[in-house]
Image (cartoon, helix red, strand yellow):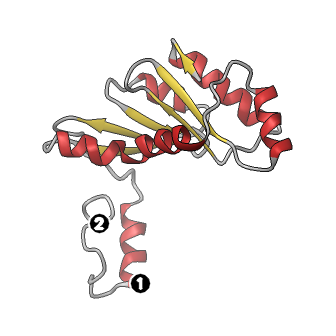
Amino acid sequence: MKFATRAKAFAERDRILRSVLQPAAIDLVNWPSGYRLLVRAVGNDAVLQRYVRELRGASIVTGEEESSLWEDVREFTPRFLAQHPRGGVVAISATHTEMPAVAASLDVPYIARAGSGVLYAHYASDPPRVSIRGDSAMMTKVKEMFDPERLLNPGRLYGCI
């Protein structure tokens, strides 16, 4: 579904999440233009017909077109990073109610996993550094319990643990 504003796209996301529908995926993207709410439905014919009824005005894609759409979403990050070698992707966790404000604060392409509360902001260059909000000491202790010699994925978690 295409929307002219972020607010309308998130309002529709909220409506879907409050409904009986249980999408396999629900992503909100702001590329290539405007805002697109992408809903993946799976199930038998009765389930799929329910989506058609509930999501009036949605573009229904199947077969190769559906595969291509979800491949575009899946491959967006690798393609973006290949085109922007100084770029980076920052994952931002937010509650469902916080997601619209977080998305509004971004002036970069993003993929919002609108059902799980994670936005992936794509920066063409110099992505902001991720900070650990006060949980660093506890995460370090847990890491030391399971990996006292620090052999597993050093620096993988937030670039420092």
Q: What secondary structure is marked by label 1?
A: helix
Q: Mark 2 points at which residue?
A: 156
Q: What secondary structure is marked by label 2?
A: loop
Looking at the picture, how far across and down is residue 80, in whole percent? 26, 40
Q: In which quarter of the image is the N terminus?
A: top right
Residue 74 visible, this angle:
yes
Figure check: 144 above or below 35: below
User: In percent of the image, x 36 and y 81: which residue is there?
Assistant: 144
User: In percent of the image, x 44 and y 41: which residue is there?
Assistant: 73
User: In percent of the image, x 81 and y 49: which residue is there?
Assistant: 44
Residue 130 visible, this angle:
no
Q: In this view, does 118 lie to the left or right of 56?
A: left
Looking at the picture, how far across and down is residue 94, in whole percent? 52, 40
Q: How many marks?
A: 2
Task: Between residue 66 and residue 79, name the one nearer to us.
Answer: 66
Q: Three-letter amino acid code at disc 2?
A: Arg
Q: Is residue 76 left or right of residue 48?
A: left
Graded by Cα atoms within 10 Å as few (under 14), some (14 to 19) or many (20 or more), the crowding at tag 1 reads few
Figure check: 145 above or below 14: below
- Mark number for residue 145? 1
Q: Three-letter amino acid code at disc 1?
A: Met
Looking at the picture, how far across and down is residue 151, in whole percent? 26, 84
Figure check: 124 above or below 116: above
Looking at the picture, how far across and down is residue 161, in whole percent? 29, 68
Residue 84 picture quarter: top left
Residue extending farthest to the bottom is: 149
User: In percent of the image, x 36 and y 62: which residue is there?
Assistant: 136
- In this rendering, which labeled residue sits more in front, label 1 or label 2? 2
